[in-house]
Amino acid sequence: MKGDRFSEDKIIGILHEGETGVPVRDLCRKHNCSEQSYYRWKAKFGGMTVSEAKRLRELERENGELKKMVAEQALDIRMLKDVNSKKW
């Protein structure tokens, strides 16, 4: 699967162009993207500015790191409980 072909800047530019009244089919043909991609972008980035989209990407990255940390801590806790529950 091809991914990240369009940057947030380009996506938001395409969405703003679509808001001016250009038909979606013509817009997608011009920018060489599918209508499905356009509507998916509209659901995710609709009404955002470029700086807000960059902030969203940064928050998603940070959220992923935090989830990874919580998972590691949960494994550590489980391991310590298993070791502590054994009778010596």
Image (tube, grey):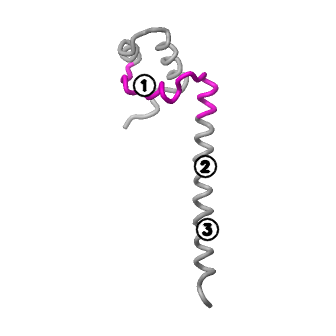
Q: For residue 68, which quarter of the picture? A: bottom right
Residue 31: image location, x then y, percent: 41, 17
Q: Quadrant of residue 47?
A: top right
Q: Which amino acid does label 1 sit on?
A: Tyr
Residue positioned most to the bottom: 88
Residue 57 position (above or below residue 83)? above
Between discs 2 and 3, the one toward the N terminus: 2
Residue at point 49%, 9% (across, down): 20
Residue at left offset 53%, top offset 21%: 12
Q: Residue 65: give its label.
A: 2
- Image: magenta residue range: 32-56
Q: Is residue 20 left or right of residue 81?
A: left
Label 3 crowd (10 A; few <14 / some 14-19 / many >=20) = few
Q: In which quarter of the image is the N terminus?
A: top left
Instruction: Name the kind of residue labelled 2 in the image.
Output: Glu
Disc number for residue 76 = 3
Dot placed on the residue nearer the N-terminal end, 1 or 3? 1
For the residues labelled 1 and 3, the Cα–Cα distance comes to 42 Å
Residue 45 at x, y = what percent? 53, 26
Residue at figure coordinates x 62%, y 50% from the top left? 66
- Tell me the kind of residue under disc 3: Asp
- Residue that badge 1 annotates: 39
- Say if mark 2 contacts mark 1, CB within 8 Å: no
Pointer 2 and pointer 3: residues touching (CB < 8 Å)?
Answer: no
Residue 31 among those drawn in magenta: no
Q: Is residue 38 above or below residue 82?
A: above
- Residue 21 appears at what percent x and percent y? 45, 8
